[in-house]
Image: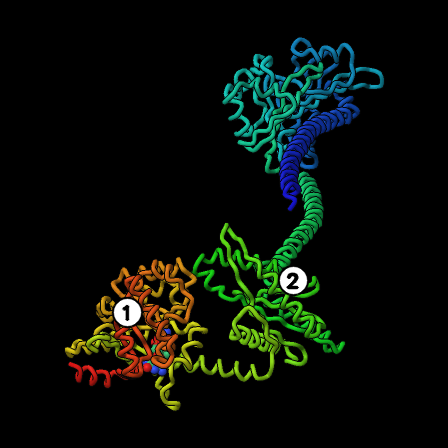
């Protein structure tokens, strides 16, 4: 995601808002200042206008009166009592804005001829007033503001002529503070501050109307302004340049300089207007407009940024999606590989094999061709695992896979179904080709594998099924190839078998048998039968061999040869033997508890178990569970059994010996054990196979062979037990030959517990 754009947008927005704020603020203050200036100007202009108006008004009045014939006549005749302007004053008061107005008439010599406010006349004003002197000297219209004894006033003097004969002067006087009153109507308070230089002149004015030496000319001065003036220096206010805005007092202040007739500043008009009375709406409207424009610009900018951002974001999302898709593809491929290929060998696994087989079958159906499946199972792979561990087993599988790949064409599919099972799919091959492939595999496997310096050899049992002859579905073809593979195992391993229909029946029978053996174990249908072993010399009971019998509810007693090899093949023999050992020990414990001398208990062990340490644990557990004395336990090992797996077997036998048991080599003479090797094993007894005893005394070779075995056993300090003794002659011959213990039908067949008890009781 483009965070840069987001960050810069946020910063820009902030800058924009800050700048806008400053701009609006400055604009507002500049507009306000402008407005205040305008207000100040307006106040000054207004007051000036009012002053001019007033001056003009009284001048007009003077001019009007100067042309009055009555005045001229009276001045010519000096009949002063004919004047009365009180009605004129009243009229002016009523009809005009001239509320306080006075008149004075001077004669041509500057003497007061008439005063409307007093009866006092005849006094000369030439000396008292410069303006009067000027007028007499040079009659002309004089208009202005002047300070007198009582106040400052508006004055206008107009010469009175009779034709060209100067008769005198008419003077009109008006109060000045009416200007302040008029200004008030316009919301402006005006304080008329008369300059301090007039202080001495204003002799008839009350002292209290002075602030410092400045006369306040208002009749009723504004209290606030007066307060302000009193609380500071008067100069501070009359010297204001431009204007003052006092937000605290909510006023705007400005000063107007009032000039006298000689154009000299004679007074200052301090004017104030309430800020709250100033109409700021226009400014606010302008500012609002600006804010609106700025806001619109901001919104547009935000929208633009948003547009670019979303466009950018879409691109970003698109890129992310592409990346995601890419990694999903990689992962999917990886998963497909994991799902379809065997992690150990890298060959296609069961899933891919099934898929490819289905494809082959589809094409073969369409093109009317054949497809063959070779089902391969390593012979004795379990022994490799048990002997050298699973790592070695795995390494062997990898090497085997390489050799398999070397044995077939590239287009043939080899897969590992799991464990030591492999399959090969061959397309459109005849029997001869298949045999060639099977032979090639076998040849490749002949050479020993050398892994971590250890030499290993292994072979394959191969089952072959062919589409469509042996099945048209993949499931059936695999099952039938598997069945054929079992057949190859039964036939002695390291070979191949083509599937035929009889094999299916066999396969079903095997499944059936597997289930019923398992059920039999659960239902305790297996029973130990005991066959006695007697001392060759005095025929006393030395012990018993426990031999299994399957007491089948419908088939009766099933002998071990009918199910033990199969039980060994499917592995259930481990549980069966454990069960047999524990049951026999319990029975022996019962015999002993009854005081019966049953001697040693011999049990059989399977080749499956001798390569596995867990057998030692099983024996230990049975001894512990039953409290059976290990010294009374003899374990019979078949000569042919696993003896090749020398080191492991030797170790396990030593562990068993460590528990206190004795060990016997069973069926001796049928295998090919070297006696030197046997010497190294912790063996106590050697049982001569009954096949050598059977034909005694008829077969002289057997007799001499038996004698040789006994002599050899003796030299190895082993006890010799002969089995299959059926006749007295045989018993006698074996006794004479030095055999220690005899076992066979001659003494007793294998019998169940209760019969054994009777037998023992009879013997004791
Ligand atoms: N013809 C003849 N036979 C005699 C005579 N005396 C004994 N036998 C038979 O010879 C076999 C001796 O047992 P084995 O060699 O251990 O051979 C046993 C043993 O290898 C195996 N077996 C029996 N019980 C068990 C067992 O619990 N576990 C295992 N793993 N194998 C067992 O089954 C084999 C066969 O057992 P069985 O049928 O009981 O056959 C027994 C026994 O009945 C005789 O005088 N004449």
Secondary structure of residue under mark 2: helix
Query: Measured from the top left, where is residue 540 in percent x and y?
Result: 20, 77
Query: Measured from the top left, where is residue 264 in percent x and y?
Result: 68, 14
Query: Measured from the top left, where is residue 160 in percent x and y?
Result: 78, 19
Q: Name the residue beneath numbered marker 2.
A: 407
Q: Image quarter for residue 60?
A: top right
- Classify 418 as above or below 100: below
Point out the residue furthest to the front here.
700
Camera sees residue 182: no
Point out the residue furthest to the right here.
163
Crowding near pointer 2: few (<14 within 10 Å), some, many (20+)?
some
Horizontally, residue 630 falls left or right of residue 610, namely left
- Classify 209 as above or below 352: above
Q: Considering depth in this image, is 383 or 575 the residue closer to the camera?
A: 383
Horizontally, residue 543 falls left or right of residue 702, namely left
Query: Measured from the top left, where is residue 633 in percent x and y?
Result: 26, 69
Q: Earlier in the sequence, mark 2 or mark 1?
A: 2
Q: Residue at x 57, y 84 (%)?
A: 502
Horizontally, residue 300 falls left or right of residue 465, namely right
Q: Name the residue beneath numbered marker 1.
A: 634
In the picture, the quarter occupied by the C terminus is bottom left
Q: Residue at x 57, y 70 (%)?
A: 495
Q: Considering depth in this image, is 74 or 43 the residue closer to the camera?
A: 43
């Amino acid at each position: 995601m483009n965070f840069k754009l987001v960050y810069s947008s946020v910063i820009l927005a902030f800058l924009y808002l800050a700048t806008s704020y400053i701009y609006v603020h400055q604009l507002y203050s500049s507009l306000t200042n402008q407005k205040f200036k305008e207000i100040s100007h307006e106040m000054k202009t207004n007051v000036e206008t009012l002053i001019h108006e007033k001056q003009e008004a009284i001048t007009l009045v003077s001019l009007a009166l100067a042309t009055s014939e009555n005045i001229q006549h009276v001045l010519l005749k000096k009949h002063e009592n004919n004047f009365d302007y009180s009605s004129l004053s009243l009229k002016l008061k009523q009809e005009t804005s001239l509320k306080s107005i006075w008149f004075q008439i001077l004669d041509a010599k500057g003497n007061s001829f008439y005063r409307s406010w007093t009866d006092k006349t005849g006094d000369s004003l030439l000396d008292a007033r410069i303006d009067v002197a000027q007028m007499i000297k040079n009659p002309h219209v004089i208009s202005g503001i002047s300070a007198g004894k009582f106040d400052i006033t508006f004055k206008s003097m107009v010469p009175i002529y009779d034709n060209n004969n100067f008769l005198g002067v008419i003077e009109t006087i008006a109060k000045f503070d009416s200007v302040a009153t008029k200004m008030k109507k316009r919301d402006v308070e005006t304080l008329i501050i008369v300059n301090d230089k007039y202080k001495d002149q204003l002799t008839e004015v009350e002292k209290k109307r002075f602030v410092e030496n400045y006369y306040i000319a208002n009749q009723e001065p504004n209290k606030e302004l007066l307060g302000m003036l009193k609380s500071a220096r008067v100069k501070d206010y009359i010297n204001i340049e431009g204007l003052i805005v006092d937000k605290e007092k909510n006023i705007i202040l400005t000063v107007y300089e009032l000039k006298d007739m000689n154009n000299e500043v004679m007074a200052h008009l301090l004017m104030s207007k309430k800020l709250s009375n100033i109409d700021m709406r226009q400014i606010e409207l302008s500012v609002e407009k600006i804010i609106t424009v700025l806001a619109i610009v901001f919104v547009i900018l935000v929208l633009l940024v948003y547009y670019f951002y979303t466009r950018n974001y879409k691109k970003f999302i698109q890129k992310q999606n592409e990346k995601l898709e890419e990694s999903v593809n990689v992962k999917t491929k990886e998963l497909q590989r994991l799902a379809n290929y065997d992690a150990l060998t890298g060959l296609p696994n069961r899933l891919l094999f099934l898929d490819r087989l289905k494809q082959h079958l589809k094409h073969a159906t369409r093109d009317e061709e054949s497809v063959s499946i070779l089902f391969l199972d390593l012979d004795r792979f379990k022994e490799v695992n048990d002997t050298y561990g699973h790592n070695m087993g795995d390494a062997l599988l990898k090497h085997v896979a390489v050799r398999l790949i070397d044995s077939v064409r590239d287009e043939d599919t080899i897969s590992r179904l799991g464990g030591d099972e492999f399959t090969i799919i061959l397309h459109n091959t005849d029997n001869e080709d298949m045999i060639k492939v099977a032979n090639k595999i076998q040849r490749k496997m002949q050479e020993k594998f050398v892994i971590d310096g250890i030499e290993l050899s292994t072979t394959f049992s191969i089952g072959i099924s062919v589409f469509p002859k042996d099945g048209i579905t993949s499931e059936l073809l695999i099952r039938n190839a598997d069945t054929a593979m079992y057949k190859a195992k039964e036939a002695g391993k390291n070979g191949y078998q083509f599937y035929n229909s009889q094999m299916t029946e066999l396969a079903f029978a095997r499944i059936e048998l597997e289930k019923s053996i398992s059920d039999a174990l659960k239902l305790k249908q297996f029973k130990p039968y005991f066959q006695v072993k007697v001392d060759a010399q005095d025929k006393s009971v030395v012990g018993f061999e426990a031999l299994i019998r399957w007491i089948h509810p419908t088939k009766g007693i099933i002998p071990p040869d009918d199910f033990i090899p199969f039980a060994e093949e499917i592995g259930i023999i481990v549980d069966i033997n454990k069960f047999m050992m524990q049951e026999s020990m319990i029975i022996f414990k019962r015999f002993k508890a009854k005081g019966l001398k049953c001697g040693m208990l011999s049990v059989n062990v399977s080749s499956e178990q001798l390569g596995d340490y867990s057998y030692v644990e099983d024996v230990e557990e049975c001894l512990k569970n039953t409290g059976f004395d290990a010294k009374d336990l003899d374990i019979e090992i078949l000569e042919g059994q696993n003896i090749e797996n020398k080191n492991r077997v030797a170790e396990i036998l030593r562990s068993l010996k460590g528990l206190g048991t004795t060990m016997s080599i069973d069926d001796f003479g049928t295998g090919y054990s070297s006696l030197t090797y046997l010497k190294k094993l912790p063996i106590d007894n050697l049982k001569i196979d009954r096949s050598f005893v059977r034909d005694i005394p008829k077969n002289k070779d057997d007799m001499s062979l038996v004698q040789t075995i006994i002599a050899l056993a003796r030299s190895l300090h082993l006890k010799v037990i002969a089995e299959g003794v059926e006749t007295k002659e045989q018993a006698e011959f074996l006794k004479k030959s030095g055999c220690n213990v005899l076992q066979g039908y001659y003494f007793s067949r294998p019998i169940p517990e209760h019969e054994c008890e009777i037998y023992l009781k009879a013997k004791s």
